[in-house]
Amino acid sequence: QVVYLNGEWHAATAAKISVNDRGFLFADGIYEVIPVYQQRPFLLDLHLQRLQRSAAAISLSLAPLETYQVLITELLQRNRVMDGLVYLQLTFGIDEHRQHLPSQPLTPTVYASVSPFNARWEIPTPFTVTLLDDIRWLRCDIKSTSLLGNIMLKRACQQRHADEPLLHRDGRITEGASCNYFFVRDGQLYTPPADHLILAGITRTWVIHLAKQLQIEVHETPLFTHELTAMDEVFLTSSSREIQPVGQIDDIMIGQGQCGPITAQLIGAYHTSKRHLIQE
Ligand code: PMP
């Protein structure tokens, strides 16, 4: 694997960053994960626009977005990955020593790599998820590399032998530790609003778009844990897991534990949009 670091290309094992990088010391940075099908990035513009929103939120200056587009194209040319996940990270850069605020403007550290992943073309086996208190901060809309809360939640979930947490704040559902959630009730689609409590997933945006195309009514509205027993279908979304059906939430069985018809319809539409990308 060849990776990009600050204008240079290195073997992944040879790329090195400074111990004074603010990403290392403070996780003072942002990132994107972009799925690639047959060497073509999927929904790249939406990912770069979100990168811009994350950068603006933390006052990190970005190069023009075309720069990252060119970088990703070259990354994909240099690596023979057909289906993969591009990882793009920017930190505030290298300071003279550890101090919370740098004394002068720094040059951001830019890192990009691509790793292979298994694109899905079938309906996945439903997940079992577990409800956990959302212990994270109140700016989950920023795609920050500070993922300590998310990782603690993933560990708690692993201890319960579940596939993914379903997070809530005092009963109000937020998202997963690395995904968004959707619910189907009486043929209509529900998902929590894209406020500061969740990351507005690109897959989430795309699923909402696909649902509207399929004439499925979509509600971006607060949802509560006490409503879960009334749900006919549940699924989660992320760039790496695409659309993943959920069959069980702790002791609550959802639709006999199988992938429901609306979820299956959306998975089909998602696969069609991937096929369009490949055939472009
Ligand atoms: N929420 C969180 C907390 C995430 O980390 C992610 C991405 N891994 C998502 C939602 C889904 O975002 P996307 O669809 O852009 O991958």
Image: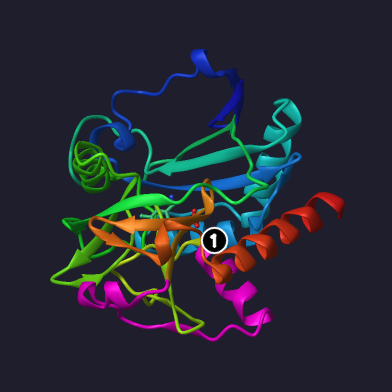
Going by the numbered disc 1, the residue's amino acid type is Thr
Residue 215 in the magenta stretch? The answer is yes
**Left or right relative to 205: residue 147:** left
Label 1 lies in ligand 1 vicinity (Cβ under 8 Å): yes
Q: Residue furthest left?
A: 170
Q: How many numbered discs sit on the rendered protein?
A: 1
Q: Find residue 40 and report its image quarter.
A: top right
Q: Nearer the viewer, residue 62 or 115?
A: 115
**Where in the figure is residue 154, as x and y percent of width and height?**
27, 42
Local crowd size for mark 1, using a 10 Å CA cut-off: few (<14), some (14–19), many (≥20) = many
**Left or right relative to 30: residue 224:** left
Can residue 104 be seen here? The reply is: no
Q: Find residue 174 and report its image quarter.
A: bottom left
* Quadrant of ligand 1 in image: bottom left
- Quarter of the figure that contains the C terminus: bottom right
**Where in the figure is residue 180, as x and y percent of width and height?**
41, 61
Q: Nearer the viewer, residue 115 or 272?
A: 272
Q: Secondary structure at mark 1?
A: helix
Residue 271 in the magenta stretch? The answer is no
**Where in the figure is residue 109, as x and y percent of width and height?**
45, 37
Q: Residue at x 18, y 44 (%)?
A: 100
Q: Residue furthest top?
A: 14
Q: Please determine whether, in this image, residue 168 is positioned above or below residue 89.
A: below
Q: Residue at x 30, y 37 (%)?
A: 22
- Quarter of the figure that contains the N terminus: top right
